[in-house]
Image: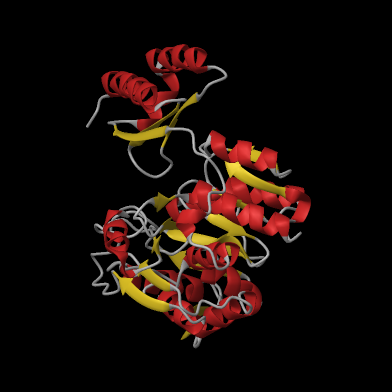
């Protein structure tokens, strides 16, 4: 499967050719959200699924995500093994040539699974605006909302291979927010390029991030006694307000490093089902063991019932500021003593009232600086100070 960027067909063909050359049979699922791979690999009993996508990154980037037979991403160790084989010079032993075919009906299979999961969700009368990022959800997202009865309007549904995530989708949610604020829609959802993330916008045009969506889902499932283990898994980026809301409602919280892989691993280890990230990467293993933006949006509406998103506050957020600093070498952060001295000093000053988190991006030449503080002014001041140190020590680009 793949998203809509122009290099997708080429890489899909190359990947399929490699599978066939190695003696495997490759079935092409076409354009479909990433969680579709996690769902269909189990539905059809495949050994492996691959998605050609660079998620929320610009169209020039591309990559491959692999899912094992249980619908979970392959481990870091297996990824390293694959990369070593690709980069190696030793020829693999010859094998009988396999076949490359189309996997007919993949979008229909995905839509039917969504309909089955949300069979009791009636969206009649809901006016919903969707931003599909010119990406993998551009067909299936509007379709499932319509099937469930919503009045749907969709933005960014004309992919040309280069406009994926370009000024639209969950990484550029201002477009959606301004449209919803006009008053013609009850709420909106913005997906990223490969459809594994979602952010929401309430009728006033206020953005509702992944922390808030996850809190809404957790409290809803807890009240219905459908939250296995009465717990959720989140990352170190999750707002303090989320922890407070969960504690007050008797929901346990496990904290992991940033990344949906870590969240899923913690869910599987504990036997829990729900987890996610502030970015809108929400996992409900009761549906599929992967982030699924479309399913998460529907879960949000299930949790809301007849209420409006603007009227349902599942948590009170502590002021938070996140700045992505473009640097020459993100790997140099680990040994940047002056940066860590500044982090330690600001952490001591905020102890018991807030926190500081600095980390390198896993995919881009960025260092992420995050600060939470009791008031906005202090949050901004501490962030500005730390951003300045990072720029000075790591060479801002």
Is the residue 110 above or below the residue 284 in the image?
below
The x, y position of residue 204, in whole percent, is 35, 55
Horizontal side, residue 99 vs residue 6: left or right:
right
Is the residue 297 above or below the residue 143 in the image?
above
x 63%, y 78%: residue: 120
Quarter occupied by residue 363: top left
The x, y position of residue 217, in whole percent, is 60, 56
Quarter occupied by residue 109: bottom right
Q: Image quadrant for the N terminus?
A: bottom left
x 24%, y 57%: residue: 167
The x, y position of residue 169, in whole percent, is 33, 60
Horizontal side, residue 137 vs residue 147: left or right:
left
x 52%, y 37%: residue: 239
Quarter occupied by residue 327: top left
x 38%, y 57%: residue: 54
Can residue 54 be seen here? The reply is yes
């Amino acid at each position: 499967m793949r998203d809509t960027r122009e290099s997708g067909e080429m890489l899909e063909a190359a990947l399929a050719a490699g599978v066939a050359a190695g003696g495997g049979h490759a079935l092409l699922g076409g354009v479909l959200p990433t969680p579709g791979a996690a769902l269909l690999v189990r539905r059809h009993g495949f050994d492996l699924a691959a998605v050609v996508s660079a998620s929320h990154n610009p169209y020039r980037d591309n990559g491959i995500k692999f899912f094992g037979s249980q619908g979970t991403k392959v481990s870091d160790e297996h990824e390293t093994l694959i990369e070593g084989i690709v980069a190696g010079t030793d020829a693999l032993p010859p094998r009988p040539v396999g076949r490359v075919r189309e996997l007919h009906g993949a979008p229909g299979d995905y839509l039917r699974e969504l309909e089955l999961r949300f069979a009791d969700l009636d969206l009649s009368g809901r006016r919903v605006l969707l931003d599909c990022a010119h990406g993998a959800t551009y067909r299936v997202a509007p379709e499932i909302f319509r099937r469930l009865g919503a009045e749907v309007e969709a933005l960014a549904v004309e992919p040309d291979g280069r406009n994926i995530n370009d000024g639209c989708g969950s990484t550029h949610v201002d477009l959606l927010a301004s449209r919803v604020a006009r008053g013609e829609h009850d709420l909106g959802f913005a997906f990223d390029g490969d459809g594994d993330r979602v952010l929401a916008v309430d009728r006033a045009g206020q953005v509702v991030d992944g922390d808030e969506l996850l809190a809404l889902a957790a409290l809803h499932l807890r009240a219905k006694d459908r939250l296995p283990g009465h717990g959720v898994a989140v990352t170190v980026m999750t707002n303090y307000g989320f922890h407070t809301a969960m504690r007050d409602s008797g929901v346990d919280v496990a904290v992991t490093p940033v990344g949906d892989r870590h969240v899923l691993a913690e869910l599987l280890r504990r036997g829990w089902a729900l987890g996610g990230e502030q970015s809108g990467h929400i996992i409900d293993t009761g549906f599929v063991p992967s982030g699924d933006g479309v399913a998460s949006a529907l879960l949000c509406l299930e949790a809301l019932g007849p209420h409006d998103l603007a009227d349902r506050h599942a948590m009170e957020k502590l002021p938070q500021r996140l700045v992505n600093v473009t640097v020459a070498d993100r790997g140099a952060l680990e040994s940047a003593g002056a940066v860590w001295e500044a982090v330690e000093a600001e952490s001591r000053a905020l102890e018991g009232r807030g926190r500081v988190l600095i980390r390198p991006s896993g995919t881009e030449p960025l260092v992420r600086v995050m600060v939470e503080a009791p008031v906005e002014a202090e949050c901004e001041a501490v962030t500005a100070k730390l951003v300045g140190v990072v720029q000075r020590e790591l060479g801002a680009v």
